[in-house]
Amino acid sequence: MPRQRSRISNSFSFSFLFVVFLLVRLSAFAQNEQDALWNYKTGRDMESRNRMSEANQYYNEAVRICNNEVNRNNATRDTYTILTWTLQRQRKYADVISWGERGLRLFADEYRIMEVMGEAYFYLDNYDLSLRYMQRFINSVPQGDRTSVAYFFIGEIFRYRNRPRHADIAYSAAVRMEPNIALWWYRLGLVRETIGDYSLAVDAFGRAIRINPYYPEATEAYARTRSRVQ
């Protein structure tokens, strides 16, 4: 009986220590991801203040933390997401794609990586793959935080490809979801003007001007299309 109790006690001690070990590891993973995200957000804040030298210091630290997690086989979907976000801010688009592909091989449903890869391919002028990833993202998250951004990029692709009616649909979806960005209304006005829908173009240019009264391109376009309506 004492020997049996000893075995039970040893088994319990081992299980308890194993659980503690797992909790410590999970806590470390979470802390590393929080540190990486904090550096990414701080870098983005510095960038918004035109302090790019400082921004890159934080971005580089976020990349270092994420790379360490990958090298330790501790990387999660958040690790790959933060890494691709950070590289995107640094305009390292080829690296975004390389790491994004690795992340999606492990986490095929990670829609945040889909979206950032769509942007990276766009800036590399690979519109076919950009469109593919943006559509995958929208299908995964029809009402996500960056779904409006995805629609805007799709609109840009169709505008560049001289498909103004398709661009109109995409831009319209973008401004419906996020109505306070003057640039998006301006681009919507341009494709409507191309189609010949001048009254709708006037409305779009007018919305851009109301959001940003100091928008010379929109002001000029508004006057130009308004004269076609009258």
Image: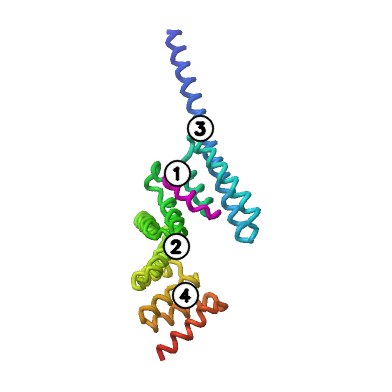
Q: Residue 153: image x %, image y %?
A: 43, 63
Question: Of the residues tagged 3 and 2, which is closer to the observer?
Answer: 2
Tag 4 residue: 186
Secondary element type, mark 1: helix
Q: Which badge, 3 or 2, comes first in the chain's sequence?
A: 3
**Between 124 and 57, the one nearer to me in the picture:** 124
Magenta-drawn stretch contains 94: yes
**Between 167 and 211, the one nearer to me in the picture:** 167
Please state which amino acid type lies under the numbered disc 2. Answer: Val
Q: Give the CA distance from mark 1 to mark 2.
A: 21 Å
Task: Point out the stretch of residues depicted in magenta.
Answer: 90-103
Secondary element type, mark 2: helix
| Label disc, if present, on residue 124 of the rendered structure | none
Q: Residue furthest bottom?
A: 230
Residue 97 against residue 24 in the figure, above or below: below
Please state which amino acid type lies under the numbered disc 4. Answer: Tyr
Tag 2 residue: 149
Q: Residue sitting at 59 percent across and 47 percent down?
A: 60
Q: Give the CA distance from mark 1 to mark 3.
A: 19 Å
Of helix, strand and loop, which mostly describes the magenta segment?
A: helix
| Label disc, if present, on residue 23 of the rendered structure | 3
Q: Give the CA distance from mark 4 to mark 2.
A: 15 Å
Q: Which badge, 1 or 3, comes first in the chain's sequence?
A: 3
Quarter occupied by residue 159: bottom left
**Answer yes or no: do the residues labelled 3 and 4 have beta carbons within 8 Å?**
no
Tag 1 residue: 77
Q: Is residue 29 visible?
A: yes
Q: Residue 98: image x %, image y %?
A: 45, 47
Residue 53 against residue 26 in the figure, above or below: below
Q: Residue sitting at 51 percent across and 54 percent down?
A: 88
Q: Residue 121: image x %, image y %?
A: 43, 56
Question: Of the residues tagged 4 and 1, which is closer to the observer?
Answer: 4
